[in-house]
Image (cartoon, rainbow, N blue to C red):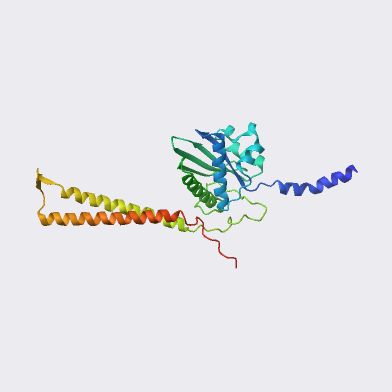
Amino acid sequence: MFPLVLALLVAQTPALADEIEAKGLVVMVSRYEGLTPIEAVTLADRLSKALRDANVPVAMDALEVTSRLGEQRAPESCQGKPECFAKLGRELGVAAVVVIDSSKVFDDLPMRITLQDTQEGQTIFKRSYTASALRPTELDLAFQSASQEIKKTLTGEDSLSSDTPRAPNLSPSGTQAPGLTGLGLRPTPVHITRIGAGVAGAAAVTFLVLGLSQVARLQSERSPGVSSWTYDQARAIRDKANTRLTVSGIFAGVSGALLVTSFVLPSEPAPEPAK
């Protein structure tokens, strides 16, 4: 009987090795000064959702990460050491770890987001973001931006130098997660609309400054109560100021309309039908 049991265990060893092969990534919060533990978990969950929406494979949510690691191996105990996060990731059986380092400053939430390779313990990606702690929409926009940058890093779309550590393969079993192979990020309607809103806003400010400068010229005096301009000159300056202020108002309206429109447009382009 014992030789039979031993033979069965040996036969099952390759299958067990495949089951524990590192896949996907998880999100951890290393520091959260000014935030409660519940708020820290919420941060990790929001970023996890943004990563999933960007087709990046997230192996488990923040609560499961916390429960599996336990209090003795909490991410905050790593004190920002990359090799410590890599070790925790290996214990969870994932290929990479996304770490949020944040602290609440008044109503702002500055964050540093890094991507750690669990095999080599190297930092693959590092960016800083700032969002309002009072506006969840602004926080989600920052996480969407971070997720897209992380996806670019994982798919090799960033212009990486030869000295940059190679991004881990999150799906080593051979079946890549959807969107992680040969995926070219195209500008979405949201990005185009917000760029247009920014350009229109800048034009509005420019024409406003020019118009106000004309108004200031019109009010200049040679002496108290005596204008520097003739009647015809004053009319020309006034007309030019009114024109520039009107154009400024038009651009401001266009900027506002584009900005409002961007919030109702999809953030990702619709997938192309399979041929």
- Identity of the residue furthest to the right in this view: 1
Whether residue 166 is visible: no
Q: Identify the residue shown where x is 29% and y is 54%.
A: 248
| 63 relative position to 235: left or right | right
Q: Identify the residue shown where x is 60% and y is 56%.
A: 178
Q: Identify the residue shown where x is 56% and y is 42%.
A: 44
Query: Depth check: 136 or 67 in front?
Result: 136
Task: Find residue 175 and report its horizontal and vertical position in percent.
Answer: 66, 56
Query: Depth check: 192 or 15 in front?
Result: 192
| 79 relative position to 106: left or right | right
188 lies above or below 132 = below
Q: How many marks?
A: 0
Task: Find residue 255 and report its horizontal and vertical position in percent.
Answer: 36, 54
| 116 relative position to 215: left or right | right
Corner quadrant of residue 203:
bottom left
Q: Quadrant of the N terminus?
A: top right
Whether residue 36 is visible: yes
29 lies above or below 253 = above
Task: Find residue 238 and report its horizontal and vertical position in percent.
Answer: 18, 54
Q: Quadrant of the C terminus?
A: bottom right
- Identity of the residue furthest to the bottom in this view: 275
Task: Find residue 243 and report its horizontal and vertical position in percent.
Answer: 23, 57
Query: Depth check: 142 or 266 in front?
Result: 266
